[in-house]
Image (cartoon, rainbow, N blue to C red):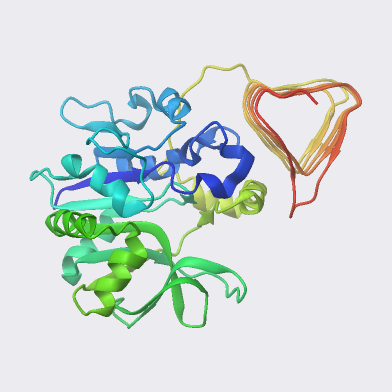
């Protein structure tokens, strides 16, 4: 069974506030040298999915710049590769309101008889999953749709977009939208495997009825009618969900845990990203660094603890950085004091500046600003 991939790049932009004012959620930097799309795109490439459509909405220039010709993901192929699918490519007069509308705008791309399956993914769920295993289980189950799921700790006051109950074989017996995790349930990871012909039929039918939301208007509705057989593929590895600013901050900090890094970055299935030739990070005399993730090309002369630094960050003498995410090209002046701060790309922190947030409410400094 041959599969193509679809990645949503803009669906959750509004939930990440200032971090996605000028970029898609897919191109949001993460973990020192990656963008969020690197994880799902690498998973697809490692799983033999080489024809991938990226559905875009707006602010996707930085995403195109990051991906380039996709050679770093082994997707610069003669007959396959990555295709950008903007909302107006199919003649639509407006941007999409939900996943069904977004998929319908890409129906010309999906309607390719060379492929049997379509793997549809968000770009906010970071993991290292082998889609080959999920597709094999999908075919064996004879299901119409397979949802990739995992077990999450029970959070009675935290609603998830898709919560499922299953039987012992992984067949879905109950489907809940925007519901809390309960005992015996599993949580959708924003990854779906469709039979391509069924998906084409569903998109044309739902579009004609004005339906826009994949989970509520199609999956749940058809499942409750008994017209859709849905199964699950349970993933038991590391899953990081960047659903909002708080979780984005927490998940970057989670990379300081060696077990989390080992579960996310595996030798046998690497996470690829855009290659840049940078000098090694320079640690000046008197610098103090502990429990950090630091990319190449940095120059550190101050104190950096429990932080994530991207490429080309400069930290001047006397500065104290604690629990911060510092993106590429940022310069931190002398004797600055930063705690629980997210500094976007190319920020300049002046001498003696003091910025302090909390893990629940980190301070965000937008791209290119001076503070």
Q: Nearer the viewer, residue 283 or 210?
A: 210
Residue placed at 59% from the left, 54% from the top? 259
Residue placed at 23% from the left, 79% from the top? 225
Estimate the x, y position of residue 170 in percent, counting from the top left.
Answer: 31, 76
Q: Is residue 122 above or below residue 298?
A: below
Within the image, what quadrant is residue 332 found in? top right
Within the image, what quadrant is residue 87 found in? top left
Estimate the x, y position of residue 23 in percent, counting from the top left.
Answer: 51, 33
Q: Nearer the viewer, residue 305 or 118?
A: 118
Q: Quadrant of the C terminus?
A: top right
Estimate the x, y position of residue 210 in percent, counting from the top left.
Answer: 27, 57
Q: Nearer the viewer, residue 202 or 267?
A: 202
Can residue 337 be seen here?
yes
139 displayed left or right of 176: left
77 displayed left or right of 292: left
Q: Is residue 357 above or below residue 32?
A: below
Q: Residue furthest left?
A: 113
Residue placed at 72% from the left, 24% from the top? 369
| Mark count | 0
37 displayed left or right of 211: right
Estimate the x, y position of residue 291 in percent, counting from the top left.
Answer: 74, 43
Can residue 30 be seen here?
no
Residue placed at 19% from the left, 56% from the top? 208
């Amino acid at each position: 069974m041959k599969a193509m991939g679809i990645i949503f790049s803009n669906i959750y932009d509004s939930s990440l506030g200032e971090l996605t004012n000028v970029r898609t959620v897919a191109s949001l930097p993460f973990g020192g040298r990656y963008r969020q799309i690197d994880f799902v795109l690498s998973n697809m490439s490692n799983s033999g999915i080489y024809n991938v459509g990226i559905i875009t909405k707006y602010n996707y220039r930085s995403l195109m710049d990051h991906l380039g010709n996709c050679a770093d993901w082994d997707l610069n192929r003669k007959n396959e590769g990555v295709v950008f699918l903007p909302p107006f490519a199919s003649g639509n007069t407006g941007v999409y309101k939900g996943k069904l509308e977004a998929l319908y705008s890409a129906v010309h791309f999906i309607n390719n008889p060379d492929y049997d399956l379509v793997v549809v993914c968000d770009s906010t769920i970071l993991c290292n999953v082998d889609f080959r295993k999920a597709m094999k289980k999908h075919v064996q189950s004879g299901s119409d749709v397979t949802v990739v799921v995992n077990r999450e700790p029970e959070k009675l006051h935290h609603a998830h977009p898709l919560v499922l109950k299953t039987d012992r074989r992984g067949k879905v017996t109950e489907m809940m939208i925007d519901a809390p995790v309960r005992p015996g349930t599993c949580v959708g990871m924003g990854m779906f495997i469709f039979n391509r012909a069924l998906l084409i039929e569903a998109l044309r039918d739902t579009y004609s009825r004005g339906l826009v939301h994949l989970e509520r208007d199609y999956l749940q509705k058809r499942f409750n009618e008994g017209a859709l057989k849905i199964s699950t593929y349970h993933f038991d590895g590391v899953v990081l969900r960047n659903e909002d600013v708080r979780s984005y901050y927490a998940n970057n900090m989670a990379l300081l845990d060696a077990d989390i890094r080992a579960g996310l970055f595996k030798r046998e299935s690497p996470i690829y990203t855009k290659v840049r030739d940078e000098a090694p990070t320079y640690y000046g005399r008197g610098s103090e660094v502990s429990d950090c993730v630091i990319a190449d090309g940095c120059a550190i002369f101050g104190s950096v603890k429990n932080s994530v630094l991207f490429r080309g960050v400069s930290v001047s003498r006397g500065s104290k950085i604690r629990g911060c995410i510092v993106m590429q090209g940022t310069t931190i002046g002398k004797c600055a004091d930063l705690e629980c701060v997210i500094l976007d790309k190319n920020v300049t922190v002046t001498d003696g500046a003091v910025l302090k947030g909390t893990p629940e409410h980190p301070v965000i400094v937008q791209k290119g600003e001076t503070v």
